[in-house]
Image: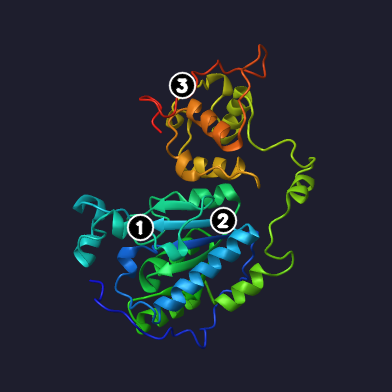
Amino acid sequence: MIPQEIRYQTPIQPLPPSRAPWEPDPDRAVLLVHDMQEHFLSAYVPGEEPLRGLLHGVAEMVRLARLRGVPVVYTAQPAHQGRQERGLLQDLWGQGVADDEHAAIVPEVAPGPRDTVLTKRRYDAFEGTGLHELMGALGRDQLVITGVYAHIGCLATALRAFVLDLRPFLVADAVADLGADEHRMALELVSRSCGVVTDLSRMRQVLEGPGGPERPTQHQEGEQEGREPGQARPYPTSLGELAAQLEETTSTPADGITPDSELPSIGVDSVRMMMLTEAWSTLEAEVDFTDMVQCRTVADLADLLETTHGFTMAAPQKGPSERVPSRPHARRGGTDGGR
């Protein structure tokens, strides 16, 4: 069981030497915020170590990652899991997260609108979550791990990443554990067997290195994408363009995609929703992933894009480039819209 009260000095000095020679690279990395939920942090003494350092370390890593354009992914275990869902976890840890209040991610490190939150039910962050597929879709092969508990879920995630040929980096002062011995053990095991143990100071140097953490301005973003500022937005502005982008994302032929097509039936799963959320966001307006996951049909996606970016999607034209028939207006929000 989780101890009733946890306080200890974070045992990070000196850091254990890592067998792996890897260096973190912002262009190859995903930041993982592992299980920073009220349930798992409730035993830590407020205002004392390791909680104080944990919250500071994770919040700083999230801030720097967002500024540098490193994708930020959270994991969280759901409340009200039954025995079948929890499996052997129940034998070791009991019922788990009791209610939605305890399932919430603590406000100090709360997810932002462009971050991704994955539901997990086992120790490692890959099992049944889509994290591996997401990293593949993003072209990322490094996982920077923060959160709790270091010798359980964080260690299991690092080992699984290594097995999947993904390079894990454990941030020693942005994780915490049930005690100092367990914390130090996790650092030793990762450094010896599967990854690199680093710290906030080193990661700050990496994320504030050449190119700086600042995101490009609107003008710079336009130049980088080969367009004039404010032009050629990455999101579709007609139903035909929407169908074409969904075809690229899912390999479902565009001529088989209609406004009434249900997203799962054309291959739009949670991982592809994450990809579309990122692709359709701009500096001026960000598509909210929480709104995206409530979409059930192609018409819902069209409405979401219109609401987010403030335009009216063009009606289909008679021609090969516009193959989707007109959609009923404002399907989301009605009894059959599902949002």
The structure residue drawn at horizontal position 35% and vertical position 57%, both measured from the top left corner, is 104
Q: Residue at x 40, y 75 (%)?
A: 176
* Residue 217 appears in the figure: yes
Q: Which residue in the protein does label 1 denote?
A: 104
Question: What residue is pinned by disc 3?
Answer: 260
Q: Nearer the viewer, mark 2 or mark 1?
A: 1
Instruction: Tell me the amino acid under the disc marked 3.
Output: Asp
Marks 3 and 1: in contact by CB < 8 Å? no
On the question of residue 21 being in view, the answer is: no
Tell which circle, 2 or 3, labels the residue nearer the N-terminal end. 2
Residue 307 picture quarter: top right
Rounded to the nearest angstrom, the CA distance separating label 2 from label 3 is: 31 Å
Residue at image mark 2:
71
Instruction: First in sequence, mark 2 or 1: give its number.
Output: 2
Residue 199's place in the image compared with 161, above or below, is below
Q: Quadrant of the N terminus?
A: bottom left
Distance from label 2 to label 1 (Cα)? 21 Å
Q: Is residue 134 above or below residue 316?
A: below
Q: Secondary structure at mark 3?
A: loop
The image shows residue 285 at horizontal and vertical percentages of: 61, 43
Q: Residue at x 38, y 66 (%)?
A: 153
Q: Are marks 2 and 1 in contact (CB under 8 Å)?
A: no
Q: Tag 2: residue type?
A: Pro
Q: CA distance from mark 1 to mark 3?
A: 34 Å
Which residue is found at the position 52% from the left and 34% from the top? Answer: 304
